[in-house]
Amino acid sequence: MIDVVMVPCFVVKDETVVVVDVLRATSTIVTALANGAREVVPVKKVEDALAKRSKNTLVCGERNAKKLEGFDLGNSPLEYKSEVVSGKTIVLTTTNGTQVIEKIEGNSIIAASFLNVSAVVEYLKEKESITIACAGTNGKFSLEDFLLAGMIVKRLERDDLVDGALVAKRYFESVKSVREEIKKHSSHARRLIFFGFEKDIDFCLREDLFGVVPVLIDGAFILREVR
């Protein structure tokens, strides 16, 4: 069975849970690990992130799209180049994505983005019960997250869809251009463009740049190669 939930206000429990925050937390997690970071540790609070500062650790994140004072990096995946993150532990706190991660319980928890969508689909083919948890923006619906969820559901080619998965799939099928749909209609995308992050959006909407799947183990996302 496959389900899709938006901005969960309760604990999401399933055999496999896919975390989606396209703009930008899961895109950043995927990019950091693909570029050689040792692990990405998601935390909810700013003070918790700062408390984890140590050698070979970068404290990273944002609030309201802006890099936090005293942090090494913000939440732009373009900052997470191999020469910056290779071999490092990344401690990440964000407005939306890392908050949702704390509401998830599953035998397998992974991070998905357009950047690794085919790798995610391949990983999920062997899973029976799946919930895709979309982070949204400030507690509200985000179409970019729901659209990626629909793309994943569509590519899995299964019939055992709960209502949320069925609607997400139909939304994806109705869209001619994912990039145009998001840049034109996503309020979060328009807000990021206003703040000067249009290059982030263009990057986050690239499909299959990386063939990796971040898996959450003992509180940290680590890399799983798929191709």
Image (tube, rainbow, N blue to C red):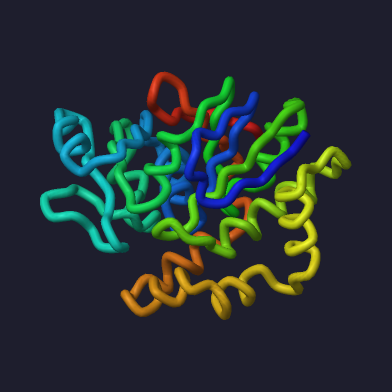
Q: Position of residue 80 (x, y in %)?
A: 35, 49
Q: Is residue 67 above or below residue 51?
A: below
Q: Is residue 81 left or right of residue 127?
A: left
Between residue 169 and residue 200, name the one nearer to us. 169
Residue at the limit of the structure toward the left, as seen here: 70
Q: Is residue 143 above or below residue 74?
A: below
Q: Position of residue 65 (x, y in %)?
A: 31, 63
Q: Position of residue 75 (x, y in %)?
A: 33, 54
Residue at the limit of the structure toward the right, as seen here: 159
- Tell me the quadrant of the picture where the C terminus can be found: top right
Q: Is residue 90 above or below residue 106?
A: below
Between residue 142 and residue 111, name the one nearer to us. 142
- Residue at the image point whose x is 88% and y is 41% from the top: 159
Q: Is residue 199 above or below residue 27?
A: below
Q: Position of residue 135 (x, y in %)?
A: 49, 50
Give the number of marks.
Answer: 0
- Residue at the image point whose x is 78% and y is 52% from the top: 166
Q: Is residue 16 left or right of residue 19?
A: right
Q: Quadrant of residue 174?
A: bottom right
Between residue 124 and residue 161, name the one nearer to us. 161
Q: Quadrant of residue 226?
A: top right
- Residue at the image point whose x is 54% and y is 30% from the top: 109
- Tell me the quadrant of the picture where the N terminus can be found: top right
- Residue at the image point whose x is 39% and y is 27% from the top: 220
